[in-house]
Image (cartoon, rainbow, N blue to C red):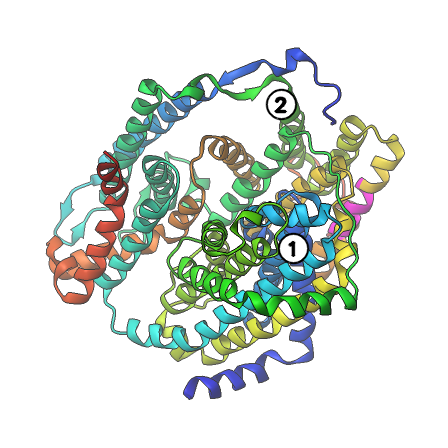
Amino acid sequence: MEEINALFHGFSVAMTPFNLMLMFVGVTLGVVIGVLPGLGGANGIAILLPLTFTMPPTSAIIMLSCIYWGALFGGAITSILFNIPGEPWSVATTFDGYPMAQQGRAGEALTTAFTSSFVGAFVAVVMITFLAPLVAKFALKFGPPEFFSVYFLTFCSFIGMGKGSPWKTLTAMMLGFSLAAVGMDTVTGQLRLTFGLSELMRGFDFLVAVIGLFGIGEILLSMEEGLSFSGRSARINLKVVIETWKKLPQYWMTSLRSCLIGCWMGITPGGATPASFMSYGVAKRMSANGAQFGKGHIEGVIAPETAAHAAGTSALLPMLSLGIPGSPTAAVLLGGLLIWGLQPGPLLFVEKKEFVWGLIASMYLGNIAGLIIVLTCVPLFAAILRIPFSIIAPLIIVICAIGAFSVHNAMLDIWFMLLFGVIGYVFKKLDYPMAPMVLALVLGDRAEDSFRQSMLISQGNLNVFFANGLVGSIMALGLVMLFWPLVNKLREK
Amino acid sequence: MTNTDITSADKHAVIGVRAMEIIVAVVILAFGAVIAWASYDLGAGWADDGPQAGYFPFYIGVIIAISSFVTLMQALLTRAPDVGAAFVERGQLKLVLSVLVPALVYVLVIQWFGIYLASAIYIAVFMVWLGKYAWWKGLLLGVIVSVCVFMMFEVWFQVPLHKGTLYNPLSFTGY
C-alpha cells in the first residue's frame, strides 16, 4: 500500500491552486489543439514547451500532460460533429459518431465519447499507479545490455505491429536514427555527419521535426482536400448527459475489452491510433449488434474512444519508468523532462518521488477537469471549427514557426521545420510511418550509448545481449517482432 | 479555396504514386549512401576502447540503403491494380503550393526582418489572397496576432524571438 500513500502525497503536491489553474488552462488549450487541424498533441506540446521553461518542473509537466488529455478529448468533437478526425486516433470514432450526429443524437454521441475517454484514461492511470513503481524497481537492476534490449524490442515492435510495408517502417526509423546521430558524438566528442556546417553541431532537435512533420505536413494535406467545413451543431445539457450515462453501464464488456486493448497497445509502442482501430474491429466482431456498427451504434463510439484514451495514457508508463516513450507525444513530454534536468527512467522514482507522484496524481485530476470542460464547453469548441481555413492556416503556420524557433533560438530550425513539413506531406501520402521516425530521433543517442557501453563491458562481444535469461528473452522477443512480417508472409503462401 | 472552381484540367495527375515512390526511394537510398560513406570516413571500425564514432551511423546508413532499395524494387516490379493512381492532381498541387510558396517567402522575410513583421504580413496576405477578405481585415488580424505574440513572448515570458538579420523594424521597442 506504499503506492496509495505516495499517491496521496502526490495529490497534495498537485492540488495547489496554481497547479489546478494550470490543469484547466492545459486541458482547454489541449482541446483547442485537438480541434484545430494541423495542431495535435505532439506538436502542440512541442510548441508550448518553451513557454514552460520558467515554471517549476512539476507544474510544467502537469500543464503539458493536461494539454495531452485535452487533445485526446478534442479529437472526438471534430470526428462526431464534422466527420473530420482532428487527430489520427479519432478516425475510428467517425464511423459511428458522425452517423449518430446526423440522426440528431450528437449530444448522446459526444457524451458517450467523453465518458468513454474518461473511463479508458482512468483505468490506465490506475494501472500506471500500481504498475509503474514495480516496473521501475525491476528496471533498477538493468545494465546497459538490458536497456539496449528494451530499445531493441521497442523498435522491432514497430516493424512487427505496423500495418504498412515493414521496409518503409524500417526506412523511416533508420532515418530518425541517422538524424539523431548528427552533431557531437557523446562518447568520443568527434563531430559526426555535420558536413562542415557549424550550425549542425547541435544536431537535429526532434521538437523541430515534430512541429514540421505533424504541423506543416498536416496543413499541406488539409489544404489539398480544399477543406470546407460543414458540421452539425450540438448542445449538451444535463438531461442528455444523465440519459446517456444510464445507457452506458450495459456496455461494460465492450468498455473493459477496449481498456485492455488500449493499455496493452499503449505500453508496447503501438500507440493510440492502432489501438482505436483494433478495439473498434474487435467490438464489431464480438458485439451482438455487430451489424449495427457504422450506422450510428453507441458501442462504435465507446470502443475506439476508450481504447485511444487508455493507450494515450498508458504510453506514459514506459516513459516514466524506463525512459522509453510509447508514442510521439510521450516522447515530447520526455524531451521536456530532459530539458528540466530530470532523467526519466527507474531512478526518477527514487530520486524525484514528489515529481513522479505529483504527475500521476495530476493524471487523475486532469482527466476529471477534462471531462468537466468538454461536457460544458462543446458549442464553444465546435465554433472554432467554423473559423474559415484561410484564417486558421496562416495562424497555425505562424505558431509553428515561433515554436520551431524558440526551441533553440535558431533561425535555421524554421527552415528545417519547413523541410520536415514537406517530408511529412510526402511520407504521409506514401505511407511511411512517422511515429517510429520521431521515436528513433528521440532515443537514437541513448540507444547508441547503451549499445556502446554494452560493447565496452563485453569488449566487443555481441554475446553480451544473450548473456542472461532476462536480456536474452527480451532480445529474442525483439527478434520475433522484427521477423514477424516475414513469418506472416510465409504463412499466407 | 472551395471545390467549385476545380476544372477538369485540375483532375490531371501531375505525378503518379509509383513514380513518386521511385523518386522518394532513390533519394533515401542516396541519403543512406551518404550517411554510410561519411561515417566510414569518420572511422566505422573498432578501436581499443570499443566502437568508433562512425560505427553506429555507418550501419544505420547501410540499413537505410538496403530498405529503400527493397522499396524501390517493390515499386518498380509492382503489378498492383492502382499502379497508375495519382500521387497528386493538378488542382491539389496548386492548392498545396499556394500554401507552401508563401510559407517559403514568409520564412525568408522572418530571416531578414524578424518574426513579428513577417507574421503580420503573412497572415494579411494569406487572408486577402486565398480567403478573399478585405485587405484591412487581414492587416488588422495580422497586427493583432503579432502584438499578442510580442506581449506573450518578449514581455511576459521573456523568451526573445528572431528579430531579423537585415533590419530590425522593432528596434524602437527596446526589446
- Quadrant location of residue A377? bottom right
- Quadrant location of residue A472? bottom left
Q: Which residues are magenta?
A: B142-150
Q: Disc 2 marks which residue? A: B92
Residue name at image x 61 percent, y 48 percent: A96
Q: Magenta segment: does it hold B144?
A: yes
Residue A437 percent across, percent down from the top left: 41, 44
Q: Disc 1 marks which residue? A: A74
Give whichever of A252, A170 is nearer the camera.
A252
Under tag 1, what secondary structure? helix
Q: Is residue A159 above or below residue A59?
A: above
Q: Specify whether A390 is left or right of B33.
A: right
Give whichever of B89, B115 is nearer the camera.
B89
- Quadrant location of residue A111? bottom right
The answer to whether one can see residue A187 in this image is yes
Under tag 2, what secondary structure? helix
Rounded to the nearest angstrom, the CA distance separating label 1 from label 2 is: 28 Å
Residue name at image x 32 percent, y 35 percent: A167
Residue B1 percent across, percent down from the top left: 74, 27
Q: Same chain for labels 1 and 2? Say yes or no.
A: no
The answer to whether one can see residue B159 in this image is no
Question: Which quadrant is the C terminus of chain A positioned in?
Answer: top left
Residue name at image x 47 percent, y 48 percent: A206
Residue name at image x 29 percent, y 74 percent: A138
